[in-house]
RNA sequence: UGGGCUGUCGCCAAGUGGUUAAGGCAUCGGACUUUGACUCCGACAUCGAUGGUUCGAAUCCAUCCAGCCCAGCCA
């Protein structure tokens, strides 16, 4: 269900009052990392907010820092956004605006609103003051326009080394808002840029670049996260002082944080380095590529994001909410029998070589499949105990009769154990008149369990992904102490033959999980079925 | 402690002076069931605290408390 949200209200208002007649939003990633669920909120919200009002949605790479960015992320990010189903109307690069930004910086200088500072970084830091004490003006703050202009030009033409000079906005060194204390707006970096190559050796800082990028593109509502609230005054200052025609409005919303998940770049890097995960696409991560790998349907992500709305508060959302959307998205998948931890059952009184039972894989009975059955079948090891423990136990036990779904009632008579005492086989008997569909109702089985024919079942590897972190992990502890050592479980499982031929890739493994077929011999769990079974 | 924010059920989250304080997740009952699934019923908060304004406040005011963000030539 879609929540109303304050940004939607603002947009509706702006349309109503005529402030805007066309909405333009954007998603402005820096190409320096992979997208995760948190970004999905921004992407989906920017996208829907624009589309719901017939507006435009841009993708803009905020590539203003060549030393931290890499072209390899450009493709990956685009792929993720495409996968998310949020096609952009236009693709831009902040670096395409470098010339305009340079001109705007010159304009600031001409207006006496920016100056070249010769102080080294440490001195700038030292004179910025702190949270409680105002900063001190730079001795270079009152250079003449001419001197600033020629110095800035010299910066551009490469006459200085990295860090030798910066261009600063002249705002207010005594502002209680640190962002207003003459922020650096251009720094010297003799670095190769992935798009502009070696054309530039000065690069604009975020506080200067971002508002200009928005204004240049005619962004009407510039959405960002809460930590930029403090930057809004400088954002507005830049748009105003640079005399931009278009005046975008920055609006901040709360970040989406998932409880007990890892999405921080540093954390993920640590996991990659220690070999816990292969890369950012690991299905156990909430990166978009990880979720894609895991088989999470995009529609589930959209519904999840919309169900959360766009609040200003920041909490930790439980993954269960996403999982519930995944289940509901996958609910109509064809059903199959998958036994992940097989235990052999020999039906001692079953006479023939076997038979084929027919049963629908879906509720509408439009997808029929044949289920082989014979005197040897596999059931889930968990579905058997020697002695029925209590009334609630709805599975197999010695002397207890259950229905093998779509087949017959069987009763466990005895077990065969190996030298270590482990049960390796159950001897059972079946009752021919209890055949599924026969309307037999003289007695009720103790439960219904699934099975796979031992001879014609298909051996597969079945993988289950568990959380990477232990429950209620204390983030202040070392990573290795809070890592779940068993976050990936692989089983030598068996599925009914139809699981290979039915339309996929999603199935509901009855009584277990929604699974995805990766290949003829490999399946993995997307999400577990809900279960009220205790114990 | 300067500035900027946030605080509604275990977790999300509506609500903007008059509602029995939505809904989802989770939990607990129960019905149904050839999936302990699905579905369906039912249970589950007085709104961070304290004062005040008002006939009436989660919604307005004051004070206090708690949490988050800001001192990169990162974004």
Image (cartoon, rainbow, N blue to C red):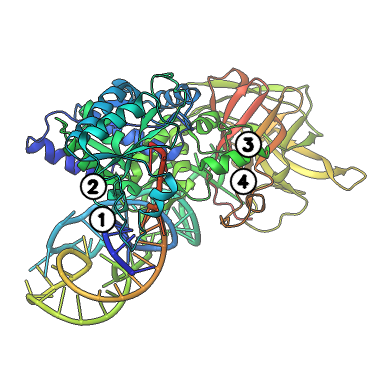
Q: CA distance from mark 4 to mark 3?
A: 53 Å
Q: CA distance from mark 1 to mark 3?
A: 42 Å
Q: Which mark is residue A410?
A: none
The image shows residue B60, relative to residue A508, as above or below, that is below
Mark 2 or mark 4: whose residue is earlier in sequence? 2
Q: Which mark is residue A175?
A: 1
Callout in the foreground (2, 4) = 2
Which residue bears the numbered disc 4? A444
Check chain identity for marks 4 and 1: say if they share one: yes
In terms of secondary structure, where does tag 3 sit? Answer: helix
Residue A47 horizontal side relative to residue A455, left or right: left
Mark 1 or mark 3: whose residue is earlier in sequence? 1
Callout in the foreground (4, 1) = 1
Q: CA distance from mark 2 to mark 4?
A: 82 Å
For disc 2, the chain is A
Which residue bears the numbered disc 2? A171
Q: Are marks 1 and 2 in contact (CB under 8 Å)?
A: yes
| Label total for image | 4
Q: Which mark is residue A272?
A: 3
Q: Residues within 10 Å of mark 2 (few under 14, many from 20)?
A: some
In terms of secondary structure, where does tag 2 sit? Answer: loop
């Amino acid at each position: 269900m879609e929540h109303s949200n304050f940004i939607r209200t603002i947009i509706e208002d702006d349309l109503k009052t005529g402030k805007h007649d066309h909405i333009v939003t954007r998603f402005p990633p820096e190409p320096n990392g992979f997208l995760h669920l948190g970004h999905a909120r921004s992407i989906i919200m920017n996208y829907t907010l624009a589309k719901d009002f017939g507006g435009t949605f841009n993708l803009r790479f905020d590539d203003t820092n060549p030393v931290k960015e890499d072209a390899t992320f450009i493709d990956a990010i685009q792929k993720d956004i495409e996968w998310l189903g949020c096609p952009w109307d236009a693709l831009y690069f902040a670096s395409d605006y470098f010339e305009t930004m340079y001109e705007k910086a010159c304009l600031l200088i001409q207006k006496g609103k920016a100056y070249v500072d010769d102080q080294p970084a440490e001195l700038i830091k030292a004179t910025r003051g702190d949270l409680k004490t105002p900063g001190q003006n730079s001795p270079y703050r009152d250079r003449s326009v001419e001197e600033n202009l020629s110095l800035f030009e010299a910066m551009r033409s490469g006459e200085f080394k990295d860090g030798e000079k910066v261009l600063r906005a002249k705002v207010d060194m005594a502002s209680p808002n640190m962002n207003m204390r003459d922020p650096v707006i251009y720094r010297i970096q003799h670095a190769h840029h992935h798009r502009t190559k070696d054309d530039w050796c000065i690069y604009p800082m975020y506080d200067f670049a971002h508002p200009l990028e928005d204004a240049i593109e005619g962004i009407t509502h510039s959405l960002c996260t809460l930590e930029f609230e403090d930057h809004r005054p400088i954002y507005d200052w830049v748009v105003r002082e640079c005399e931009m025609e278009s005046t975008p409005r920055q609006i901040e919303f709360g970040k989406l944080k998932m409880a007990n998940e890892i999405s921080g770049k540093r954390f993920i890097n640590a996991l990659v380095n220690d070999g816990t995960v292969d890369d950012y696409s690991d299905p156990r991560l909430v990166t978009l590529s990880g979720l894609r790998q895991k088989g999470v349907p995009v529609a589930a992500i959209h519904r999840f994001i919309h169900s959360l709305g766009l609040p200003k508060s920041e909490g930790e959302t439980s993954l269960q909410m996403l999982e519930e959307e995944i289940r509901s998205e996958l609910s109509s998948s064809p059903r199959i029998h998958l036994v992940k931890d097989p235990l052999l059952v020999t039906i001692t009184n079953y006479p023939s070589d076997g038979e084929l039972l027919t049963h629908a894989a879906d509720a509408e009975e439009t997808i029929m499949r044949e289920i082989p059955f014979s005197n040897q079948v596999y059931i889930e090891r968990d579905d058997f105990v020697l002695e029925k423990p209590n009334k609630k136990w709805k599975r197999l036990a010695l002397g207890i009769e259950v229905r093998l779904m779509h087949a017959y009632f069987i009763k466990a008579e005895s077990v065969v154990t190996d030298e270590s005492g482990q049960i390796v086989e159950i001897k059972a008997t079946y009752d021919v008149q209890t055949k599924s569909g026969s309307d037999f109702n003289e007695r009720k089985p103790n439960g219904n369990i699934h099975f796979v024919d031992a001879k014609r079942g298909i051996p597969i590897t079945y993988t289950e992904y568990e959380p990477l972190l232990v429950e209620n992990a204390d983030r202040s502890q070392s990573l290795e102490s809070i890592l779940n050592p068993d976050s990936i479980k692989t089983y030598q499982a068996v599925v009914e033959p139809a699981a290979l031929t039915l339309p996929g890739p999603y199935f509901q493994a009855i009584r277990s999980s929604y699974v995805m077929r990766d290949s003829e011999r490999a399946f993995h769990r997307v999400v577990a079925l809900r279960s009220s079974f205790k114990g």
